[in-house]
Image (cartoon, helix red, strand yellow):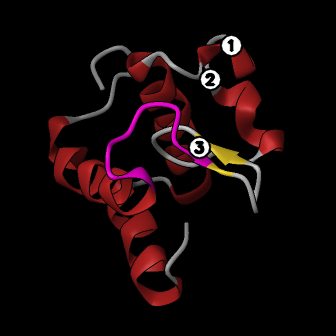
């Protein structure tokens, strides 16, 4: 979070989202959707990781990619959580 300049107030929602997506497992894979990582990025989103697909397996870089996706799309982790709770995805 510090590397991405994200306020600590977003920590609980980011952690909750990660728990839903991967259970916190580094390089988690959903072969059906081709989703990977702690935040289950889809292939078009892999570039959000600092080193693209090569970032998978590195917990910090996977978190950076997930944070970039969440904040880029939803602006806050709380907003992303609301969408996830309503649809079971984010």
Instruction: Give the Cα distance between marks 3 and 2.
Output: 9 Å
Which residue is at 27% across, 18% downward?
2
Image spot of residue 87 (x, y percent): 53, 85
CA gap between label 1 and label 2 equals 8 Å
Q: In this figure, which residue is indicated by the disc labeled 1? A: 54
Does dot 2 land on a helix, a strand or a loop? loop
Q: Earlier in the sequence, mark 1 or mark 2?
A: 2
Which residue lies most toward the front here? Answer: 31
Which residue is denoted by mark 3 in the rendering? 69
**Image quadrant where residue 60 sits:** top left
Q: What segment is highlighted magenta in the picture?
A: 22-29
- Quarter of the picture holding the C terminus: bottom right
Classify 10 Å Cα crowding around label 3: few (below 14), some (14-19), many (20 and above): many
- Residue 23 lies in the magenta stretch: yes
Does the stretch in magenta take in 46?
Answer: no
> Which quarter of the figure is the N terminus placed in?
top left
Whole-angstrom CA distance, mark 1 to mark 3, is: 17 Å
The label shown at residue 76 is: none
Q: Is residue 2 above or below residue 90?
A: above
5 or 1, which lies in front? 1
Give the percent coordinates (x, y) of residue 18: 36, 51
Q: Going from the N terminus, do you reach mark 1 or mark 3 first?
A: 1
Q: Are marks 1 and 3 in contact (CB under 8 Å)?
A: no
Discs 1, 2 touching: Cβ within 8 Å: yes
Name the residue rendered at 50%, 27% in the picture.
62
Q: Earlier in the sequence, mark 3 or mark 2?
A: 2
Q: Which residue is mark 2?
A: 49
Q: Tell me the SS state at disc 3.
A: helix
Image quarter of residue 65: top right
Tag nearer the camera, 3 or 2: 2
Q: Position of residue 39 (x, y in %)?
A: 49, 46
């Amino acid at each position: 979070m510090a590397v991405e300049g994200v306020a600590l107030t977003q920590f609980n929602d980011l952690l909750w989202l990660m728990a839903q997506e991967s259970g916190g497992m580094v390089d988690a894979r959903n072969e059906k959707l081709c989703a990977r990582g702690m935040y289950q990025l889809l292939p078009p989103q892999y570039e959000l990781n600092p080193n693209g697909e090569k970032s998978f397996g590195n917990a910090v870089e996977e978190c950076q990619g997930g944070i970039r996706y969440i904040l880029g799309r939803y602006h806050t982790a709380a907003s992303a959580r609301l969408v996830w709770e309503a649809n079971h995805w984010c």
